[in-house]
Amino acid sequence: MDWILIIVVSVLFVITACVGMIINQRNLIVMLLCAELLFLAANLNFIVFSRLHQDFHGQVMVIFVLAAAAAESAIALALFVLMYRQYHSVDTKLLSNIRG
Amino acid sequence: MEMQAFLPYTVLLSLLLPLFSGVSIGLFCQREITAVRISVGVMLLSTVAALVSLVLFYLGNAAFYDVFLFSWITIGDFSCDMGLWIDGLSVVMLFMVSLISVLVHWYSIAYMQDDSGFIRFFSLISLFTFAMMQLVMTNNLLGLFFGWEGVSLFSYLLIGFHFAKDSASAANLKAFLMNRFGDMAFCLGIALLIVSVGSPQYRELFSRMPDLVPETLLIPGLGVVSTVFLTGLLLFIGAMTKSAQMPLHMWLPDSMEGPTPVSALIHAATMVTAGVFLLCRFADLIVLSPILMNCIAFVGASGALWLGILALFEFDIKRIIAYSTLSQLGYMTLAVGVGAFNLAIFHLLLHAIYKALLFLAAGSVIHALAHQQDIRQMGGLWSKMPITAICFLFGALSLSGIPPFSGFYSKDLILFVAAKQAVSLQAGWYIYGCALLGFLITPLYIFRVFWVVFLGRPRYVTRTPVYESPMQIVGPLMILGVLCLLSGYVLLPFFAGASPFFQFPLLSPALQPLQQKVIDVVAHGLFLHAIFGLGLYFALFGIIVSWLRYSTPHYASQWMTTHVWWLSWPFVNRYGFDWCLENIIVPFFRVSASVCSQYGEQVMIDQTIESRVAGRIQGISHWFSRIQTSYLNRYFAVMSLAIMIMIAGSLMGYNIV
């Protein structure tokens, strides 16, 4: 029943990430960290279930997800750098041009 | 392996080359010399390909070839395959179109050289040539419609070529709108044919044509109408606008606002004959309804006489020739109406040659006199421009039907057939009388132009002395002049001989004796026949009368319009057709447009929808737009809440997603 524990850990990851995303009002980098945490939770589930079903496809998938996550965070960080150059800050409140 | 296997390729080459040159010049060409080289070279190639197709078809044995190119539309059990319909009619038309087109291209090099829209002009006439070829070569009704609208469009663009001029933009609008009226009827006719036969392909249409005879349609308010009659009538109304028949002809004289090469190519030789071509293409349908044939003959004969008379009251050289075109189109329609389809096409070809010649010769005069079009300001050009004068004379003799020039052959045969059929037609004697009097009127107006323009005292005022036009202008004139002299005699056996070049496959039995009579007349010698007929004497009499009346210095006397004004009044006012258009039809549409604008646009849309409905919606949406806070974390919160609800719902057994 070890895998139940790991699932619980991944659910905790998800909850942490969501809460972090919602209560954090300003910092974009923290939001990115939370998003990475979501990926991590998903990866953990992949590994657990691939172990459980004796199927390697899940672990292969993890590699792809990691690659995608790395690319995504690289792009996100590059955007943050650009934003910092523009506004001298990475505050989400500054990105509110579409407010209704 | 026969040579005829190459036939689709040569036809396709001839068809697609003008498209290529039109598109490439229009989009990419910057320099005038390149435009000339591409378009004239490509048209020449296209003409050669058309000539090869003509010869290949003539040497083959088949009555027609139905070439499949690609499947265009498939919806349920309706399908439309694009392809080529290669038979005598279409191949002859293809060659005629490309021949006139290449000569007009050549002519335009010098005629249009000072114009700022030089490259646009060449692109448009090449594209027009493509549309016309597509119209004649296609093998289904939708392709025919495509070509039909294509020639309308390029005619519109070329009439309004000098679009900054008010009269030109008014004329092209008039032509376009009047053609839309005919296209509406044409569209309905096509739809009716497709519905009653079930396929737009010519192959199915022609083979199932006789099955349509017993079919009828119930029209609310009119009662039961025979399908054949209604379809034929709708197609004929379409042909009437395109070929400018009597009540729908007003756009053609106004279309002379376009440059002269355009008038020669589009409004004399090719596009206006599309209506006659259409009637011949659907000969199998038309012969099934004798009432319709009678109507066609009536309309054609009326146009041949009454519109010809109007040319006598005009002073603009191009408008005179335009009225002459209307009159000759009337003769072609008359030939269709009396059942002589091959004579209609024969006259169409000869008319294309001599009318293009007349227009181009008139253009040569206009060019030499710095865009002077009023014949009262010309005169005495015989010695200054001898080649143009001789070519114009050849064209005029052809038009009048004097042997051995080309017009004689077709006109004499058409008159003969009309005389034979007159007894069996309703209003037959009126039809025959119109055709015969047309023989008198034709030389009267065309020799009026000749005497006034080329003889007498010079009345023009130009800054530079007047010379003969350059080789690029008189070259096409000389070629057309030689063709005028030869074409009638050479082509006669193919169109009216013992083994006609193209047979209309299902000519009704009633018309076969007529065909035989024509063949007999030709076999005994047409000239001999003409000597014992009336037409030739009427034509000669017309020339003499016009010599007596118009070669004098009193050529422009207004005696008739001032002293017997009641007699000339209908002609000076052009029978009131233009008056009707301007004072009844246009105001009617203006009033209905303003009613629509007042109640439809302003009351319905502006006041009701825009201020009430749209205002309310704007209020609601303003309220809703406050949801868009633009804070990422709130968006994320809503998103995760939604996902949680969905998961919870699916756990509770609701099938949400």
Image: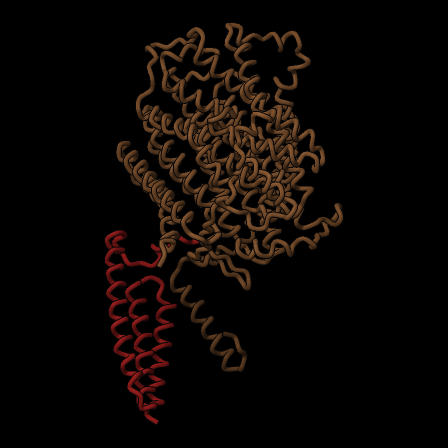
Residue B476: where, in percent of width, then height? 36, 28
Left or right: residue B214 versus residue A8 is: right
**Residue B510: quadrant of the picture:** top right
Which residue is more in the foreground, B219 or B445?
A: B445
Q: Position of residue B401 (x, y in %)?
A: 52, 25
Query: For this rendering, which residue is in front, B63 or B138?
Result: B63
Q: In the image, residue B78 lies at what x, y percent?
A: 54, 60
The N terminus of chain B - image quarter? bottom left
Residue positioned 36% across, 89% down in the render: A4
**Chain B appears in which tint?**
brown
Task: Tell me, yes or no, if residue B230 can be seen here.
Answer: no
Question: x, y (%) of residue B371?
Answer: 40, 18
Mark yes or no: residue B393 visible: yes
Q: Nearer the viewer, residue B43 or B389?
A: B389
In this view, which residue lies farthest toward the bottom?
Answer: A1
Q: Is residue B645 above or below residue B443?
A: below
Q: Quadrant of residue B42?
A: top left
Q: Please indicate whether residue B431 sits to the left or right of residue B388 in the image.
A: right
How is the protein colored in the picture? Answer: by chain
Q: How many numbered tags mark residues here?
A: 0
Vertical placement of residue B196 versus B515, above or below: below
Display colour for chain A: red
Q: Is residue B198 above or below residue B188?
A: below
